[in-house]
Amino acid sequence: MKSYTFDTLLLETDDKGIAVLTINRPDKLNALNNTVLDELEQAVKNIEKDDEIRAVIVTGAGEKAFVAGADIKELNTLNKKQGEKQSVRGQKVFFAIENCSKPMIAVVNGYALGGGSELAMACHIRIAEENAVFGLPEVGLGLIPGYGGTQRLPQLVGKSRAMEMILTGGQMKAEEAKSTGLAGYVEPQGKGVEKAKEIASKMLKNGPVALSRAIEAVNSGFRVKGFSDEAELFGDLCETEDFKEGTSAFLEKRKPNFQGR
């Protein structure tokens, strides 16, 4: 098997061709910063080119978080143009995951908030460990989900439930995620990767070209305009007073005082 070296990721493949891609920033609850996004993009390119990798499991290092969100320090200073560019950047990386020709299975082993939920939703299948917590809390920062969350969540749980989750910034634990369709399975803590390998092994008994075309066919119904609208609105919000207040309050560990401007 080939070896790949990253600063914020681990990529390991077993003798069956099942790779485990781990977001490896446990001291930061595996938060997505620009380095992680860059390396995720490169990892997917490597996976696509590596014939020995036939399926991929995506998870987070440590016991607390899958990915606890974006790095707020990097978002705090964005203006409209920069914000829209950042949204498009994250969308591009998650599109690469969603459209990967090899099955991508997310094992959500803890908090999957903001960009973490969006990463999980970009994968083809989601397995929640019992301590999993999904959420899109961006409105509490004066923002909206910007990496595809406004588009993918309604497809998975329905428009009404997605609206409630996005507009309240509320969270969804493992069992509820399963009941709404956000997750396909709930497994004991530490057992998610084992379940993912079981599912991947069943997939790999089938023709690899057929798997690739099936992924392509299922994804063909996406509305690209919805994602571009999301990026534009994300950028608009980066120049509001509420965004500046929301992100500052988060970094200062206080409640925001939104003024609607």
Image (tube, helix red, strand yellow):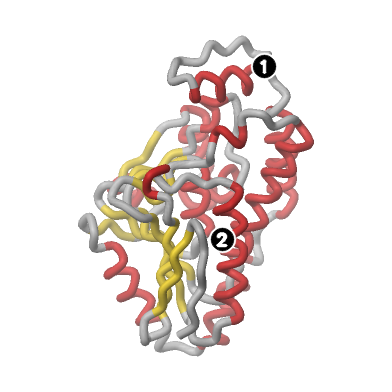
Q: Residue at x 57, y 64 (%)?
A: 97
The quadrant of the image that shows the C terminus is top right
Q: Quadrant of residue 234?
A: top right
Numbered mark located on residue 217 in the image:
none
Residue carrying label 1: 241
Q: Residue at x 28, y 69 (%)?
A: 195
Q: Secondary structure at mark 2?
A: helix
- Pick the residue in front: 132 or 22: 22
Q: Is residue 205 left or right of residue 100?
A: left
Are the residues at dot 2 and dot 1 in contact (C-beta closer than 8 Å)?
A: no
The quadrant of the image that shows the N terminus is bottom left
Task: Specify whether residue 218 is in view.
Answer: no
- Pick the residue in front: 214 or 17: 17
Against 245, residue 54 (above or below) is: below
Q: Position of residue 23 (x, y in %)?
A: 44, 57
Q: Amino acid at mark 2?
A: Leu
Q: Real-space Cα distance between discs 2 and 1?
A: 32 Å
Q: Secondary structure at mark 1?
A: helix
Residue carrying label 2: 40
Against 5, residue 227 (above or below) is: above
Q: Amino acid at mark 1?
A: Glu
- Pick the residue in front: 62 or 228: 62
Q: Residue at x 61, y 10 (%)?
A: 259
Q: Residue at x 65, y 52 (%)?
A: 91
Against 176, residue 183 (above or below) is: below
